[in-house]
Image: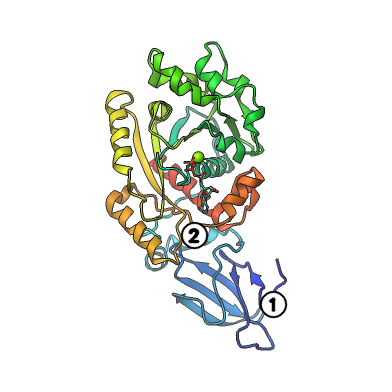
Amino acid sequence: MPAQGQGPTGFEAVGSVAVRTFSAHQSPVPQVIRTAHQSMDGHHVNAMAGDGSGAPHNHFADYDELPEGHFYDPDAEYEPDPEYAATLAPDAARQRRERVGPTGRPLPYFPIPGPLTDHGPAKIIAMCNQKGGVGKTTSTINLGAALAEYGRRVLLVDFDPQGALSVGLGVNPMELDLTVYNLLMERGMSADEVLLKTAVPNMDLLPSNIDLSAAEVQLVSEVARESTLQRALKPLMDDYDYIVIDCQPSLGLLTVNALTAAHKVIVPLECEFFALRGVALLTETIEKVQERLNPDLELDGILATMYDSRTVHSREVLARVVEAFDDHVYHTVIGRTVRFPETTVAGEPITTYASNSVGAAAYRQLAREVLARCHAE
Ligand SMILES: Nc1ncnc2c1ncn2[C@@H]1O[C@H](COP(=O)(O)OP(=O)(O)OP(=O)(O)O)[C@@H](O)[C@H]1O
Ligand SMILES: [Mg+2]
């Protein structure tokens, strides 16, 4: 990170968000944002500008945009500032003004979860949308890693024969002898033989590879074929607080197995024009599983992903999603940033790859929101 006051391309990371700054008027002393708190909709910035000497000389409150000569870079690193949210919470008026979330609803405060003294039984979450490339795998890895950071024991289940979840955690699926496929299809196979530890403390993985595609066909002739995964996960329930299943982009038998095993479904939706196409079919499938196989199943939430607050289009799509699903839409929205594709290459979650990034903060907030929803029950 460039040193404070470095001029045209430097950015300061004081407070909750970094603001890249440049000196438009070529003043001898570059303008440096000293503190900046950005509201969750990405528009309101509460910033304090200074001359780099440490003495602020200008206070800008509630700007829709940063003052001329400064711009906000959503990809910039920032220092997570949990205390900031806490300081806003008691002040209702300020909270209302500053904490309207990107979904257009007042943003509640999601407390930082306290440590757990004992673990389990696990809540099982299926990350599900038959549309491809909406952020299922990215959300599974990063929600899991954020829950693990908060001291929850997490098991991630790669339930896609593409093995993207395994790749995203640095595992080469082609080199695996045992995968979730063996756990499903071979009686007497124990989960411990298949489980892999990840680099994230508290987080394990049931990996998969192309073998799993055979299960879709082979399971058809099994007795109680829809609850095969549920049976396989049963012995693990007491070891984990959360089990998150990364589904493949289809509503076939594997996905039905994930929904039968799950307590909750999270549906990631990419903020683009066709986001809602196919969602009716998905909710219908969830309802059918609820009626016939798993009465405990609930839609926990719709997660807006790849949101770009700078485009009208993204904002309109999000507004439509909120109109359609109302309180089911998580207050937390995941912004679009190249940091996510980078993490796949690195084979680790964004919470460790770019721990201070906006993307990592978003998934930490999602973890807090998911925990808050669970505790509210
Ligand atoms: N918030 C984001 N911003 C930018 N890129 C993202 C974001 N989330 C995910 N991506 C990228 O979009 C691509 C698709 O994401 P991901 O693999 O998580 O989706 P998926 O729903 O699991 O896809 P599939 O249906 O193929 O399993 C990946 O390259 C990923 O790195
Ligand atoms: Mg995927």
x and y percentages locating residue 50 in the rendered image = 62, 80
Q: Nearer the viewer, mark 2 or mark 1?
A: 1
Q: What residue type is disc 2 on?
A: Ala
Q: Quadrant of the C terminus?
A: top left
In what element is the residue under mark 1?
A: loop
Residue found at x 68% / y 85%: 29
Q: What residue type is disc 1 on?
A: Gly
Q: Are marks 2 and 1 in contact (CB under 8 Å)?
A: no
In the picture, measured across the screen, residue 256 lies left or right of residue 52, that is left
Residue found at x 30% / y 38%: 281
Q: How many marks?
A: 2
Residue 123 versus residue 224 in the image, above or below: below
Rendered image: mark on residue 85 = 2
Residue found at x 31% / y 49%: 327
Q: Residues within 10 Å of mark 1 (few under 14, many from 20)?
A: many
Q: Earlier in the sequence, mark 2 or mark 1?
A: 1
Using the image as rendered, state which of residue 312 and residue 287 is in the foreground.
312
In what element is the residue under mark 2?
A: helix
Question: Can the viewer see residue 237?
Answer: no
Q: Residues within 10 Å of mark 2 (few under 14, many from 20)?
A: some
CA distance separating discs 2 and 1: 27 Å
Using the image as rendered, state which of residue 1 and residue 15 is in the foreground.
1
Question: Can the viewer see residue 13?
Answer: yes
Rendered image coloring scheme:
rainbow
x and y percentages locating residue 140 in the rendered image = 51, 40
In the picture, measured across the screen, residue 86 lies left or right of residue 198, that is left
Rendered image: mark on residue 71 = none
Rendered image: mark on residue 5 = 1
Residue 86 versus residue 377 in the image, above or below: below
